[in-house]
Each structure stands twice: as C-alpha cells, then as structure tokens.
C-alpha cells in the first residue's frame, strides 16, 4: 500500500514538472518577434477605425504598402502624422498607406484622425493580435511592404526624426521600384 | 395645450440634464478598477503603471464613473475595445475556468497529501516506539539506597 502511494505521489510530481516544462517550451516557441526585412509581411484582416468594413493586407497585394502603427496617446505620433499625410498625398497613386491603431481607445483614436486630418485608411487592432505579429512594442513604428508582400523596411521610430527619415525614404523608393 | 406639453417637456429636460451629467452616488471607484484592468502596453495593472496608454484608460474610467457607469459596464466597454486581455482576471467560463480551478485543486491536493503524510508519519512513530519498561530496582539495590538515605538523614 505504502509503495503504491509513494509511486502515485512520484508520478503526480513528475506529471506536474512535465506540464510546467511543456508550458515553458510552448511559451518560448510562441513568442512573437518583429519580422525581419526580406521576410513575408504577416497577413491580417482588421476593422476600419470608427467605420464599418474590414481591410486585409492580402487585398492590397500588387501595390506597395506603408503600414504605420500609431496611437492617440503617443506624442511622437502627433509629430509624425503631418509628414505621413503629406507623403500619402504625394505617393497615393503608387503606394497604399495604412494606419493601424495600437492599444488605443477607439473614440480617442477617431478624434486623433480628425484633428490631424489623416485621410489614408485607419484600422483598429483592438486585441493587439496584428501588432503582436509585427512585434510592435512601442509606437510609432512603420513597415514598408513590397508589391509581392515582402518587408522592405522597418522603421522603429518616428519617420520625422533624423535617424529614421532616410530609412523611410529609401524603403519607400525600394517599394515603389519593386 | 401643445404649448403646455412642450413647456413641461422642456422643464423635464432642464432638470434631467444636470442630473445625468453629474453622478452623486458613483457605482464604483477608480481605485478598484485600476486593480482590475491591465495596461495594454506594459502588461501590469493600471495602478502599477504610469505609461501614456494607462493614463488614457484611467481618464476614460474616471469619466465613465462620473457618468454613473458600473464597474461591469466599464469593463465590458474596455473588453469591446481592447479584447479580453485588458482584464487582469481571466473570465470564469470555458477553458479560462482552469485558471480559477487549478490553483484551488492544487491547494486541496497539497492539503490531502500533507494530511496523508502526517498520518503515516505519526503511525510509523507509534509502531517504532519501544514498549515502556517498568523501572524496577532489585531488592539489594533498594536496601543499599535506603541505607544511604538514612545516613544522609
């Protein structure tokens, strides 16, 4: 009786350790990292911010895409908004700009879009699934996706700052050429 | 007649307006909800975060409390906006129920195992104790002891 009880206890302990190990392995293998330049851009379908309907990345295949992640509470996003709108106005025949609202309250985001007169499509990533797939940990961040759906540039900061402005221009040119 | 109805309606609106705008008896508090809602960018509860995203949600909660919204209403609105992950506690349904029951089950199992261990340990100690020996002295020793005591007296 004692031997069986001891064996059962050991089996339970072993099962607990195995379960914890499995959880650790699952967590490590499912961690989301920013996709690298040259990799395929993670696909998504998101609701339009403050409106009806959805937009999917697949539906934009054939046209380069500037994917800008932003939030209404983010100060650098305010500075960047004007530059993005200007670039959208200039390149809209060649490139599709898309804004993805990151961890934000929808009414505040709608007010932000109106205040900065942003006219390119804005999408809401409520659950954070898409921002997670793109490894977004801060905003603003911008990805430039080629016609074939490959990432040609990743700008982890405002495109207006001196360090990122050139990278954005180069990425935009490369995406248009692709 | 129509003028009177319009006047009453206008008066009712005038009275109801300020009442709806200010909540004299809030149904919940910011302090409570700060512990129930997560900051989406820093993955801590709002009360442990000072990020811009957390401050935005706190401002929203404060506004809704001032409008007399209940904690449940505010939580539902935040879930509709951010998804279920915005709540610190997992929902009490479906697979998420495991998160509630596993710790309780673990504690119960631990208590049962502990009780079983203590019971077995106490039984083993009872079995291992040697039978108490009667401390007896033989007659000679008793006599010598009596003599020694008498001498001391």
Image (cartoon, rainbow, N blue to C red):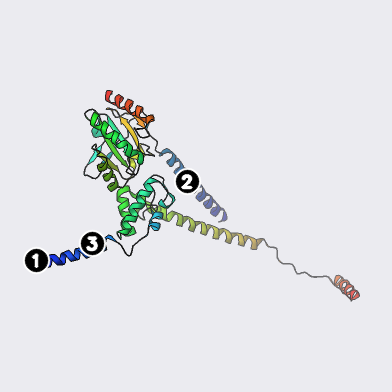
Asked whether residue A48 is in view, the answer is: no
- Whether discs 1 and 2 lie on one chain: the answer is no
Q: What residue is shown with label 1?
A: B2
Where does the image place residue A25, in percent across and percent down from the top left? 45, 40
Farthest-out residue, right = B151
Q: Helix, strand, or loop for circle 3?
A: helix
User: Which quadrant, please, contains the C terminus of chain A?
Assistant: top left
Q: Is residue B83 above or below residue B31?
A: above
Q: How many marks?
A: 3
The residue lying at 64 percent from left, 61 percent from top is B125
Q: Which quadrant would residue B62 be assigned to in this image?
A: bottom left
The residue lying at 21 percent from left, 63 percent from top is B14
Q: Residues within 10 Å of mark 2 (few under 14, many from 20)?
A: few
Q: Which quadrant would residue A168 be assigned to in this image?
A: top left
Q: Please tell me which residue lies in front, B5 or B45.
A: B5
Q: Residues within 10 Å of mark 1 (few under 14, many from 20)?
A: few
The residue lying at 52 percent from left, 49 percent from top is A13
Mark linked to residue B56:
none
Q: Please tell me which residue lies in front, A53 or B25.
A: B25
Q: Helix, strand, or loop for circle 1?
A: helix
Where does the image place residue B130, in percent across and percent down from the top left? 70, 63
Mark 1 or mark 3: which comes first in sequence?
Answer: 1
Q: Are marks 3 and 2 in contact (CB under 8 Å)?
A: no
The residue lying at 9 percent from left, 66 percent from top is B2
B3 left or right, relative to A153: left
Q: What residue is shown with label 3?
A: B17
Which chain is home to disc 1? Answer: B
User: Which quadrant, please, contains the N terminus of chain A?
Assistant: bottom right
Q: What residue is shown with label 2?
A: A20
Q: Residues within 10 Å of mark 3 (few under 14, many from 20)?
A: few
């Amino acid at each position: 009786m004692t031997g069986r009880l001891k064996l059962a206890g050991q089996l339970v302990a072993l099962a607990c350790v195995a379960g914890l190990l499995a959880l650790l392995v699952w967590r490590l293998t499912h961690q989301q990292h920013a996709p690298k330049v040259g990799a395929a851009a993670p696909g998504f379908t998101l609701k339009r911010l403050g409106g009806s309907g959805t937009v999917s990345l697949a539906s934009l295949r054939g046209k380069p895409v500037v994917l800008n992640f932003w939030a209404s509470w983010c100060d650098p996003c305010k500075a960047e908004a004007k530059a993005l709108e200007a670039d959208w106005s200039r390149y809209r025949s060649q490139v599709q700009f898309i804004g993805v609202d990151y961890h934000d309250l929808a009414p505040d985001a709608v007010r932000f879009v109106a205040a900065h007169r942003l006219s390119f499509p804005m999408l809401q990533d409520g659950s954070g699934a898409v921002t997670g797939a793109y490894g977004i940990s801060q905003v603003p961040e911008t990805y430039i996706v080629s016609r074939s759906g490959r990432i040609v540039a990743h700008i982890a900061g405002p495109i207006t700052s001196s360090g990122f402005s050139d990278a954005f221009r180069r990425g935009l040119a490369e995406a248009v050429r692709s | 007649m129509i003028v009177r109805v319009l006047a009453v309606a206008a008066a009712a609106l005038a009275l109801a307006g300020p009442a709806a705008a200010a909540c004299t008896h809030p149904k919940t508090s910011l302090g409570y909800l700060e512990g129930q809602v997560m900051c989406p960018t820093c993955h801590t509860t709002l009360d442990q975060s000072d990020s811009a995203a957390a401050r935005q949600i706190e401002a929203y909660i404060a506004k809704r409390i001032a409008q007399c919204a209940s904690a449940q209403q505010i939580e539902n609105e935040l879930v509709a906006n951010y998804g279920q992950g915005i709540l610190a506690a997992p929902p009490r349904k479906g697979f998420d129920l495991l998160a509630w029951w596993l710790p309780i089950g673990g504690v119960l199992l631990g208590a049962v195992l502990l009780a079983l261990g203590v019971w077995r340990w106490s039984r083993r100690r009872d079995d291992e104790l040697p039978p108490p020996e009667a401390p007896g002295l033989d007659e000679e020793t008793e006599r010598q002891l009596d003599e020694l005591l008498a001498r001391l007296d």
